Amino acid sequence: MAQKPSIAKGTRDFSPSEVNKRNYIMDIVKNHFKTFGFQPIETPSFENSDTLMGKYGEEGDRLIFKILNSGDYLRKVDGELLSSKDSNKLTAKISEKALRYDLTVPFARYVVMHQNEISFPFKRYQIQPVWRADRPQKGRFREFFQCDADVVGSNSLLQEVELVQLYDAVFTELKLTGVTVKLNNRKVLAGIAEVIGESDKLIDFTVALDKLDKIGIEGVTKEMREKGISETAIEKAAPLYALNGTNLEQLAVLKELLASSEIGTKGVEELHFIVKTLGDLGLQSAKLDIDVTLARGLNYYTGAIFEVAAPEGVRMGSIGGGGRYDDLTGIFGLKDVSGIGISFGLDRIYLVLEELELFPETIENSLQVLCVNFGDKEALVSLKLVSQLRKNGVSADLYPSSAKMQKQMKYANNRNVPYVVLIGDKELEANSFVVRDMVQGGQKEYSLDSIEQFIEEL
RNA sequence: GUGGUUGUAGCUCAGCUGGUUAGAGCGCUGGAUUGUGGUUCCAGAGGUCGCCGGUUCGAACCCGGUCUUCCACCCCA
């Protein structure tokens, strides 16, 4: 009956070394979330379908994993509906729960449900898996972790400033220097659309604009034409592609360009404040770049839009993103609560650190000391040593059986154990233990009465 | 959701226009080495060639379906 095991499409197992590396990233992210004053929450892995459906657009609904009702779920379904083969209508009848699609909507739901217990502004972070019935691709899975930090209940632009600092702090500690935080503002995009006379095509316009670095100016203009944007509008938008110089220089040009648009001017002012303030405060290793072509998450972002690009030379899309959304909780009945959030792309950060060999070597040393097992009597003495080491915070183990020495040494080698301890009959007699340095190759003998000496030299 | 791509030993991959017992390297097990790993030498185990069906005297190879992998698009983290 042996069947070949397999895992579901788009899912992954994580082996010890991978978990260690992922934890390394998450611990650093988490620590900075905490020092910036964010508090952790967790929400269920599945929600009522009503909570999720319709929040991510039509495409999103398709990508939500639905959970089949329990029991005889077809019994109550109308026979006519069943034979109509209308999947969308039928789904609503046989599925009332769905897997979490992101962390933002459940967070909005959380805020609304707990509004009376929360002190605003509420700063929360959340690191949990989410699921999407997407077709997998490189760096895209059907199950993946999101690391989000959001602030709700404050519309101060200082939050924008702070979140850029948070990105900077995390990537600096990860030794991932040279990342670029790209910054844009939905109001600027709206202003541009207004000035070129295509306000009603804002989404089409920005989605096309967003592809500039991918398909070039020609590709963008072609897509705009296909979406029915007028030639004059396309012409008027042309100066956007030629924006260059420092952030402040670009903002000066934008200010001019958008002078006739109230909302556009507001957006430029917001960007100016963020750029100016961060200029005064300084960043450790990240670079801040205005990028008017940045247009992610337009369905809900209303102000700032962030995206973090990996250092130059690394072929990787964005490793983080976020933005401000003025009315996220509105859909659940709580008006006028402004929110802003950022997200870290754990899987992609992992790939980048791997490529640049930035993981510390010590991550692989899961066991520091292994005692070779020579037999019952020797093992007992070894176990006493192991206990002492463990009490001192040193990860130590005794090989569980008196297998051949070669086998035990090989095991230590495969597990990357830096020190092997030998207590055989010779050592028993001398009340000592021999420590073999598996990296250098040398050996040293210590007395069992002065274990501290060994611990100090570790 | 659309188009393409991949699947052979634990891993990475060979395998000619269909032809008899399907190979290599690494890893694994045992030995050279009864107290020494990482280097060396010797021997051995391990595969329903993703799965189902079809064509053929004969299929890892050709055809159809299905699952999976990766890539592009859509979208997105």
Image (cartoon, coloured by chain):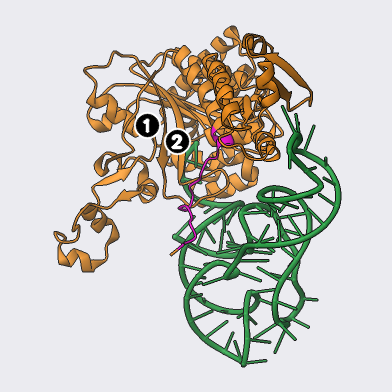
Chain colours: A orange, B green
The quarter in which the N terminus of chain A is drawn is bottom left
Q: Identify whether A456 is placed above or below A15.
A: above
Q: Is residue A280 left or right of residue A325?
A: right
Q: What residue is shown with label 1? A: A104
Of all chains, the one bearing label 1 is A
Look at the numbered disc 1 and give the secondary structure of its residue: helix
User: In what element is the residue under mark 2?
Assistant: loop
Q: Nearer the viewer, residue A215 or A389?
A: A389
| Amino acid type at image mark 1 | Thr
Pointer 1: residues within 10 angstroms few (<14), some, or many (20+)?
Answer: some
Judging depth in this view, the residue of A349 and A391 nearest the camera is A391
Which residue in the structure is indicated by mark 2? A297
The reply to whether residue A241 is in sight is yes
User: Which x, y percent locates residue A435?
Assistant: 70, 21
Residue A170, labelled with which disc?
Answer: none
Residue A334 against residue A203 in the figure, above or below:
above
**Left or right: residue B65 compared with residue B63:** left
Front-most of residues A308 and A6: A6
- Where residue A114 sits, quadrant-wise, is top left
| Image quadrant in which you'd find residue A151 | top left
Which residue is located at x 31 percent, y 29 percent?
A: A108
Question: Picture coordinates of residue A302 (x, y %)?
Answer: 41, 28
Q: What range of the chain is rendered magenta?
A: A2-19
> Residue A37, image x and y in percent?
42, 12
C-alpha separation, residue under disc 1 versus residue under disc 2: 12 Å
Chain of the residue under label 2 = A
Assess whether residue A5 is covered by the magenta stretch.
yes
Q: Which amino acid does label 2 sit on?
A: Gly
Labels 1 and 2 touching (C-beta < 8 A): no
Of A165 and A231, which appears nearest the observer?
A165
